Image (cartoon, rainbow, N blue to C red):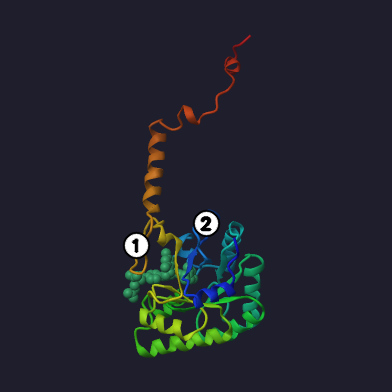
Amino acid sequence: MSKITTAKLKKMKLDKTPIAMITAYDYPSAKLAEQAGADILLVGDSLGNVVLGYDSTIPVTVEDMIYHSRVVARAVERCFIVTDMPFLTYHGSSDAALQQVARIMQEGHAHSVKMEGGAEIAANVQAITRAGVPVMGHLGLTPQSVHQIGGFKVQGRELQQAQKLIEDAKALEEAGVYAIVLELVTEELAKRVSESVSVPTIGIGSGRYCDGQVLVYHDVIQYAPDYRPKKFVKTYANVEKMIREGIAEYVREVKEGKFPDESHVFPMNAELIPHLYGGGK
Ligand SMILES: Nc1nc(=O)c2c([nH]1)NC[C@@H]1CN(c3ccc(C(=O)N[C@@H](CCC(=O)O)C(=O)O)cc3)CN21
Ligand SMILES: CC(C)C(=O)C(=O)O
Ligand SMILES: [Mg+2]
């Protein structure tokens, strides 16, 4: 079982072998994703929405990312682990950004970090890649800017915005990223970007022509109490239904006295039982 590296990911683009990436936030899910053959596990700041119950990724902290990254790293042998840098931890001086990246790598045991943004963060991306840390870019819908963007909307529908995104992709490539996530951009623009840069593009809601795909784990298996279908997601299992039904049945059997039954109990040596009641010899 050979480890995934940035060099292998670049070769996959050249060979037109699609890259399969999925988020993971905990030990069993990371293990199962690796065993299912995923190439990259993203410890996404989407964990804020998906497992911490926030309504955006903005409250997620470096400590949260470290905690979940360590857990995922413990589960994985082959996958490449990418951890999202949280809100506003890579926008100040490059020294300040490097300090946060160091924590994610050393305490979080990640293999790489991901950052949202284009030309405006390219100087810090360059400082981090020069320091020896592989950086994944993230363009299009960048959820940490949701309040500026004004919602989770498709990006790059207009020509000017599309051209800016192509320029941002080139700026990130020049700054040294080894891959770029394209989130919620039109299929035609994602195709153009994928042709314009030498590094792999990994799409989410960005169509068929990216070099890889990424989805949120809980979307893939429909594991959320308030699951809402999104156009770009395909659900491959319904874990929500299995959990609801499984737990409801457990509760019912407890209430009805059906669980536990004889098969689940640990009997005592029969000769000793009378002593429990003060009897015996
Ligand atoms: N569970 C989950 N899945 C994600 O993909 C995800 C998160 N959480 N949290 C962080 C961001 C936020 N993302 C989102 C959230 C909502 C839409 C959404 O409502 N999309 C609409 C299309 C909008 C349009 O047409 O402009 C959809 O119907 O898919 C998209 C991406 C992607 N990320
Ligand atoms: C949706 C992906 C690309 C992400 O950034 C996340 O899960 O946080
Ligand atoms: Mg993210």
Q: Earlier in the sequence, mark 1 or mark 2?
A: 2
Q: Which of 50 and 236 is in front in this view?
A: 236
- Residue 110: quadrant of the picture: bottom right
Residue 12 position in % (x across, y down): 51, 73
Identify the disc placed on residue 35: 2
From the image, tell me which residue sits under label 1.
228
Query: Any atom of ligand 1 within 8 Å of the CB at mark 1?
Result: yes
Residue furthest out toward the top:
281
- Residue 151: quadrant of the picture: bottom left
Residue 106 position in % (x across, y down): 67, 67
- Whether residue 102 is visible here, answered yes or no, is yes
Q: Is mark 1 on a helix, strand or loop?
A: loop
Decide: is 197 above or below 16.
Answer: below
Q: Which amino acid does label 1 sit on?
A: Arg
Q: Is mark 2 on a helix, strand or loop?
A: helix
**Residue occupying the point 61% across, 84% down:** 126
Quadrant where the N terminus is found in the figure: bottom right
Quadrant where the C terminus is found in the figure: top right
Decide: is 225 above or below 176.
Answer: above
